[in-house]
Image (cartoon, grey):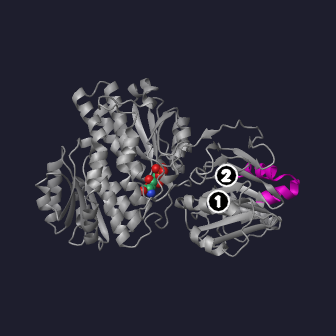
Amino acid sequence: MCGIVGYIGKQDAYPILIKGLHRLEYRGYDSAGVALISADGKLNVYKTKGKVAELERFAADKDTSGTIGIAHTRWATHGEPNDVNAHPHYSQNGRIALIHNGIIENYGVLKQMLIGKGYTFRSETDTEVLVQFIDYLRTTNNCSLFEAVQAALNQVIGAYAIAVLDRDNKDEIIAARKSSPLVIGIGDGEYFLASDATPIAEYVKDVVYLNDGEIAIINRNKPFRIVNLNNIESKIDICKLEMNISELEKGGYPHFMLKEIFEQPRTITDCIRGRINVEGTDVILSGILDHKERFLNARRIICVACGTSWHAGMIGEYLFEDLCGIEVKVEYASEFRYRNPVVHPDDIVLAISQSGETADTLAAVELAKSRGAFIYGICNVVGSSIARATDSGTYIHVGPEIGVASTKAFTGQVTVLVMMAMMIARLKGRIDTERYESVLRGLLAMPEKIKEILSQADRIKEVAAIYTYARNFLYLGRGCNYPTAMEGALKLKEISYIHAEGCPAAEMKHGTIALIDHEMPTVVIATNGSIYEKTISNIQEIKARGGKVIAVVTEGDTIVSHMADHCIWVPETDEYLTPLLSSIPLQLFAYYIAVNKGRDVDQPRNLAKSVTVE
Ligand code: M6R
């Protein structure tokens, strides 16, 4: 949801900023821009509608010199994507330039006030209001840029990560955050700033994650400082970055999404490493161990999440209720935060988020916290806002996920949820050794089983080619494969723009079955398990109405494979582990259909990877 990047140091800023924008492009890609101060003190701002490559073409014959600059890739909130609404925005006297990720909610009131003072506006954005407001305060109070930013942010309502330049001071960038992420890389006489660590990782290892309400004063000639909105100096807490640069490249794959699908044998290995012992006889998650009593006495588990992470939470519901005997609620974070939800101090709120920056999930966490609940995070991005807001948690450790469609994060989340359920069930004495060890060994075997499915990619591609014509799809599953079916439908929708609906297989006959005809394919997850026979009946109901069925079945299946039009086989495993296998062919199926349709798989229209606005 907008990516921001900045540089100040000894090197040419422009190539660093452009490379950084490419790394952050997954966050928004409807327009991009850059502002640089040249050695002779000119503030050059270049911005265009379209992707970062467009910006590069546009700026190719322009003056891009300078060792200080800021840049932005946009996901539009206020104002359509066009050249004028693109960031950076600058004050009408051309002195101050600013990039912004977030929303200034009271921009209307501020804009009217500024118009009354003679300011005029070029764009429809809330961001232009902020930069003009800073300029106004700077001029009327005759103060420094930092003081003007601080005064402005004290009057602003909303969310922001910003970086600000003053044409008349080519030695300084002022940056600040509230509810939108910002990380600052500290090098030898140079500083980098960005929405996440991906543009920074190849230059520095020392980073500082700015906290809400903090303003960084980054000056090439003075010590680095962080001061909060109340003018109190903050302690500088330097963290070490651990990021492998090769994880940020496509590594020979045509798309990040395909690379990330194929990474899953490794990412699951990374997720369980050091948590399940090699014999498969025990699982230890320190986040739970450190708060054992909380989990043993939990009244309820409330999962708060969005999108794919919400689907993972739904799988958690089946696991925790059945295996641990704990009542579970799964909430859309966006609804939870605006209800008046009942939250007890002995509830555990599970915040599930790949990015750890989703605004709705973060707000749900804050609400639950204010009501005294214990917050446990399941995040991927280390040091992210949600991870830092929780009381404890388990990282999924699947590495950077760059494709907008979440794949390896989903299987990482489900893996963590299975490990959590196993550990809690064991602590509560609710699971016998045989089942406990069998599930753990099943998890250890998962990477090899996923490899087996991936080796069928060509067959899945062929099946996808047959169904690329379809304009609607139904996805059915039962038990813990009902959320998997919803996840399969979401994957197809977001990258192919084909309408798809996930439905509990048995619920179909209460309405959705009316949609079935020879043009509407149904993807059915019919793997072995306690409700396999019931799912067979649902397949028969579809076939009886002339519908086409693509079934995901367990190897060796002889019943469904005779009924379905096409089958994709997955290896046998424990029922609770089946989502980890059945989700893989659905990811590939969606991917190949989207490719056949010529879609922009990694950056589908209207979407952004990290939704840091409401
Ligand atoms: O980073 P998060 O897991 O909090 O993101 C939640 C959703 O925005 C995300 O899962 C979204 O639905 C994905 N595009 C799905 O592929």
182 with respect to 363 (left or right): right
Label 1 and label 2: CA atoms lie apart by 9 Å
Query: In the rendered structure, which amino acid carries the disc numbered 1?
Result: Ile
Q: Residue at x 50, y 42 (%)?
A: 340
Residue 321 pos. (x, y %): 31, 36
Q: Residue at x 20, y 67 (%)?
A: 548
Query: Which of the two marks, 1 or 2, is nearer to us in this view?
Result: 1
Magenta residues span 133-158
In the rendered image, residue 298 lying in the magenta stretch gets the answer no
- When the figure is inspected, residue 170 is found, relative to residue 243, above or below; the finding is below
Residue denoted by label 2: 192
Q: Quadrant of the N terminus?
A: bottom right
Residue 449 pos. (x, y %): 26, 47
Dot 1 lies on which element? helix
> Disc 1, disc 2: CB below 8 Å?
yes
The disc at residue 555 is none
Queried on whether the Cβ of the residue with tag 1 lies below 8 angstroms from ligand 1, the answer reads no
* Residue lying furthest right: 142
Query: In the rendered structure, which amino acid carries the disc numbered 2?
Result: Phe
Q: Is residue 571 visible?
A: yes
Q: Is residue 480 visible?
A: no
Residue 406 pos. (x, y %): 42, 54
For label 1, the crowd category at 10 Å Cα-Cα, with few meaning under 14, some 14 to 19 and many 20 or more, is: many
Residue denoted by label 1: 16
Q: Residue at x 67, y 52 (%)?
A: 192
**Tally of marks:** 2
Tell me the quarter of the picture where residue 58 sits: bottom right
216 with respect to 206 (left or right): right
